[in-house]
Every structure is written in structure tokens, then in C-alpha cells.
Amino acid sequence: MDMPDVSPVRRRLGRQDWIDAALQALTDRGPEAVAIEPLASALGATKGSGYWHFANRAALVEATMDEWLRLRTDEIISRVEQDGGSARDRLSRLLAVVSTGVERAIGESSIMSSVDPVVRQRMQVAVGRRIDYLTALLEQSGLARGAARSRAVLAYATFSGHAVLAVTVPEVLPNSPQARRRAHREMLEMVLGPTPV
Amino acid sequence: MDMPDVSPVRRRLGRQDWIDAALQALTDRGPEAVAIEPLASALGATKGSGYWHFANRAALVEATMDEWLRLRTDEIISRVEQDGGSARDRLSRLLAVVSTGVERAIGESSIMSSVDPVVRQRMQVAVGRRIDYLTALLEQSGLARGAARSRAVLAYATFSGHAVLAVTVPEVLPNSPQARRRAHREMLEMVLGPTPV
DNA sequence: CGCTCTCCATACGGTGGCGTACGTTCGGTT
DNA sequence: AACCGAACGTACGCCACCGTATGGAGAGCG
């Protein structure tokens, strides 16, 4: 019997294949790398394929940024939220998740300072949702609304600053496992105040 | 008597004119804008002029980044240092200076996440000197060496995170004068501990 | 007055990405 | 078996920037 063609060598591409490759290029080399022709050659195809799935480059960038927003913001939040626990627990897990994904900071930090209007707009939405979620967690752990929000902003700024440092000058940041754990706790305390346990 | 030709309409350009224009483009639109042809047309000249003063684009970027390092790091530090006062005073002035220059953050944040090796190298030097200076100030105000350094890193990360936020989502940051002053004090306290006066 | 060195313009060829036009292949109907 | 539409290839023109070649224009000095 012949195998159903789930197939070895190289099948045809769908829109999602392009988005996946674009997201990879985005996190590896920033928004500039999300372009039709380079992605085509990376996928082993030609522009004809790309301009079939997307009207133009802007449409590709848009789809990629939507996927980015979904995976790197909404997904993470809902996963952290799903696993439950106290607000402090969730905050700690959130911090752990985003800290280990710091290799992705190259893309993140390029996205932050992009001039592309589409990229900026999606980034603004992402930052909004992230800060809102942080604010909610801080409120749930006892802070007043105003204090929670301003501290959420502070925490987010600090974290994203760390992410950028991790890319440009990684040597200034702690690298040993226990130093990283210590940094994790310190940051948690800075955000939530002295540890209650 | 005839006026010495300090001159009205349009004199010839020198290397420094190019560097000035390049620095402007850098802070306005990021490292990508530091290119021969666009700058030429911005200066009302042609590429012939540019390639006279610089061997190639990389040389232009290099000269521009050197100037940037001088003006936006060394100059600021030595000015703050020259005006004297306690370590706390100098820290406060430093914070004030870099905070008011946040319009420059567009350039700064693009520089932080640039892939250009020359830009990255100069940025690393700049971050190194800035963190070193912060560490020195914190040591002078009583902290132990290790604590001073890790807090300097934290403070720098927080500040640069704020700079990025000021560009991408300015609305989350305080904008009224008294709110900004309050933020200034809070940040100072976060870095130096509870206010001693 | 002419020479030279600095500064600049013009014109050219090269590269990479954009977008369009159009022809082609392949998998699934009917 | 014939067909149709989704997916892809090829070839073209366009633009922005790079870099080179070469020929001036302009001041200053002999």
C-alpha cells in the first residue's frame, strides 16, 4: 500500500507557512526582515507565491504582527491565568515565562522602536494589554487602583529595559542560575513590596 | 567696508557639517537614516560631497556614532560632574537632564536595537560608561560596590525602559508638571533608598 | 597670472526590494 | 477525461541607495 502523501520532500505552501516564517524572521532580525522576497527565498519559493497570499508587503507585516500579538501577549496572559494560583503566584510565573524568552528580545526590542505605522500600532496594543494585565494582578494582590497602575508601568519599563540590555550588553546582567533566581525574587519584591511569606 | 564672508546664502560644506546633519537624522529617524544620498539632498548637496569626506557609508556611521557617544554620554557626564554637589544632587541633576531629553528617545531607542555592528559597538561602550558612572555615584552615596553596581543596572534598565515607553505609548506616562516631578522623586528614592532629608 | 589642492557636480553601473503581468502546474471536483 | 481554481514560476519595470570615475569651480599662494 502506498503511504498517504503526508509527505517528505516539500509540499506546497499555505498562508500560515508564510506567517510562520515571517514571525521567525521578525523575532530573529526585526521588522525589516519581514519582506516578500527574502522570505520567499528562505521558504524555497518565489515572490509569486508571496504575492498570492498577501496583497503587498504591508499586508504581510500586518498578518505577522497580528500573529505576534496573539502569541506573545494574549497567549501568554491566558496561559498564566489558566494555571491559577494567587496573584503573587501568577505574577511570578509571568515573570519566569517572559524572562526565559529573552532570546526573543532581539525581535521585541526592534519592534519597540520601529517606525512602521502598522508595527507601532500593534506594539501599542500589546503594551496596553500587558500593562493592563499587570495592573489587574497588582490590584488583586491588594494595591489601590492608581498605585497598581503606576507600579505596573514602572515594572513594565524595568522589564523591557532589562530585555534590551540582555541583547545589547548581556554581560552586565546576572547569568548564573542562582543569580538569576535572586534577580527574579528581587524584581518581584520591587513590584509587590517585601515578600509576605 | 565689505563684510567678511561669514556669509548669507550657502557656503561650502565641511566634514563637521555632514556629521551634524547625520546626528540630526540619527536622533530623528534612527541609524537607517544615516546614509549618504538622503543626507546629501538634505544638505542641498550631492553624493560627490559626501564621498569626499567619507570613504563609504560605514565611515559616515562610525563618525556619527563617535560624535553621538561624545555628546550624549561623555559630555553629559562631565557637565553633571562639573557642577558639583553631593552624589545625590548630581544623580538628581543627571536624571533631570536625561529626562528632559526624552524627545531624543526616538533615536536612542532605535540605536539600542540596531543590528549594525558599528552602532552596536558604540552603544555598548555608551551603556558601559553610563552604568559605570551610575555605579560610582551610588558608591559615593554610601552603597557597597556590589550593591551599587546591581542597583545601577536596575536603574539604567528602568530609565531606558521609560525612554522607550515615552516613544511608543507616551500616554501611559505622567505628563503634568507635578506628576513628572513626583515621578522624578520616586525614581530617585527607588535608586537611593528612602529620602534621607 | 597661473597652479594646486580642496570641495563639489554629473553621470554611470550595480544591488535589493517592490509590485505587476502573465503563463504554468497540480489537486480536487463533476 | 476534462476542467477549474488555488498555488506557483518567470520576466519585467520601478525606485532607493551604494559606490566609482571624472571633470570642473573656488580659494589661496607663488
Image: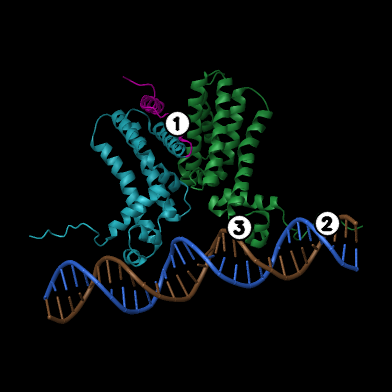
Chain colours: A cyan, B green, C blue, D brown
- The answer to whether residue D17 is above or below residue D3 is above
Label 2: few (<14), some (14–19) or many (≥20) C-alpha neighbours in 10 Å:
few
As drawn, is B46 to the left or to the right of A168? right
**Predominant secondary structure, magenta span:** helix
Q: Residue at x 35, y 50 (%)?
A: A24
Q: Nearer the viewer, mark 3 or mark 2?
A: 3
Mark-to-mark CA distance, 2 and 1: 55 Å
**Crowd band around label 1 with a 10 angstrom C-alpha radius: few (<14), some (14–19), many (20+):** some
Mark 2 against mark 1, which lies toward the viewer? 1
Q: In the displayed image of the protein, which residue is found farthest to the left?
A: A1
Q: Chain of mark 2?
A: B
Query: Pointer 1 and pointer 3: residues touching (CB < 8 Å)?
Result: no
Looking at marks 3 and 2 on the same chain, the residue that comes earlier in the sequence is marked by: 2
Relative to the observer, which residue lies in front, B168 or A40?
A40
Q: Position of residue D16 (x, y in %)?
A: 54, 63
Q: Which mark is residue B5?
A: 2
Q: What percent of the width, then of the height, locates residue B176? A: 53, 39
Subunit of label 1: A
